[in-house]
Image (tube, coloured by chain):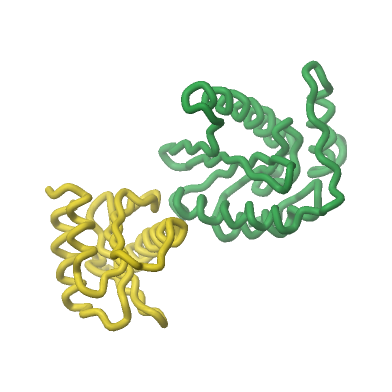
Amino acid sequence: MKDVSEVVGALSRVPGVIVAMIVGANDGLIVESSQVPGAQTNVDTRKHTAALAAYLYSKVTRASNAARLGIPAFMRLEAEKGHICVVGAGEVVLVTIVTPDANLGRVRLDMMTAAKEAA
Amino acid sequence: MSDPTVAEPWVAAPLRRLMEDARLISGVLLYPSGRAVGQFGFTNAADVMSICALTSAINASARELGRQLDGKPFYEMHHAGAERQVFMARASAGAQEFLFVGVFDRESSLGVVEMYFTEFQKALEKLRPDAAAPAPAIKLGGDFEGELNRSLDALFGPIGKR
């Protein structure tokens, strides 16, 4: 199991990732976060994104279970100016804020790998 | 989910929004003296009375503990129970301080409650009536019980009509 700082550090170096966070799955609080230099996100933005992303992921998990699909592997929210990606890793979730032009396949793969290391 | 009942009408909208957005089961907004300003989720005045008294006492103790340990009062407290969780924090509107205590379950999370509580604080600050008289401070040996009963009358109606 990798140190959480290493996990978010590695994720934040993935091209297109602006912010990478490890967030408590149940409380929605940030465990560790890292952002690329120059990213225009402040502490409040990260806290709010973390809380809502973890909350959303818990609801998606319920929907997925209700549909008898099991635990969701990867969640991506596409917005006007980018994406929010979430992957569950046991007691925590990995959350990234990604630019619109990012290579989402790479982001997904790296987040799935990081989730295994963080769990 | 029932609408909040309030002793001061200007807190009704922010309290309702906090209740709905943070998916709180119940909550009480009060003055640090223990006087209730608004509540939701309770139908029994005695429950609100107990919560106001306990929250006021907890705030006073935690404030002093914070001062001794950290040199400044604690800002908020959280207790995670097996099924339900309690969130307690201070809010201010101008010079007036308030306490809020809310209960939530797995339908919400601490992060979500904290986030919407920040918005609630901003709403209180924005909506506070300029000419609002500050809440009378409770003096030692003052009429704590009378204050509490008057605020409960405002929320639930006078005794005998509750």
The percent position of residue B120, horizontal first and vertical second, equals: 62, 54
Count of marks placed on residues: 0
Q: Which chain is yellow?
A: A
Is B115 situated left or right of A11 in this image? Answer: right
The percent position of residue B25, horizontal first and vertical second, equals: 57, 49
Give me the residue at 31% from left, 77% from top: A99
The percent position of residue A9, horizontal first and vertical second, equals: 21, 57
Query: Looking at the image, can residue A66 be seen?
Result: no
Q: Answer above or below: position of A82 versus A68.
A: below
* Outermost residue, top side: B141
Give me the residue at 85% from left, 35% from top: B150
The percent position of residue B103, horizontal first and vertical second, equals: 55, 44
Front residue (pair B85, B37): B37
* Outermost residue, front side: A38
Give me the residue at 47% from left, 48% from top: B105
Give me the residue at 15% from left, 71% from top: A109
Q: Which chain is green?
A: B
Is A12 situated left or right of B16 in this image? Answer: left
Query: Looking at the image, can residue A85 be seen?
Result: yes
Which quarter of the figure has residue B57?
top right
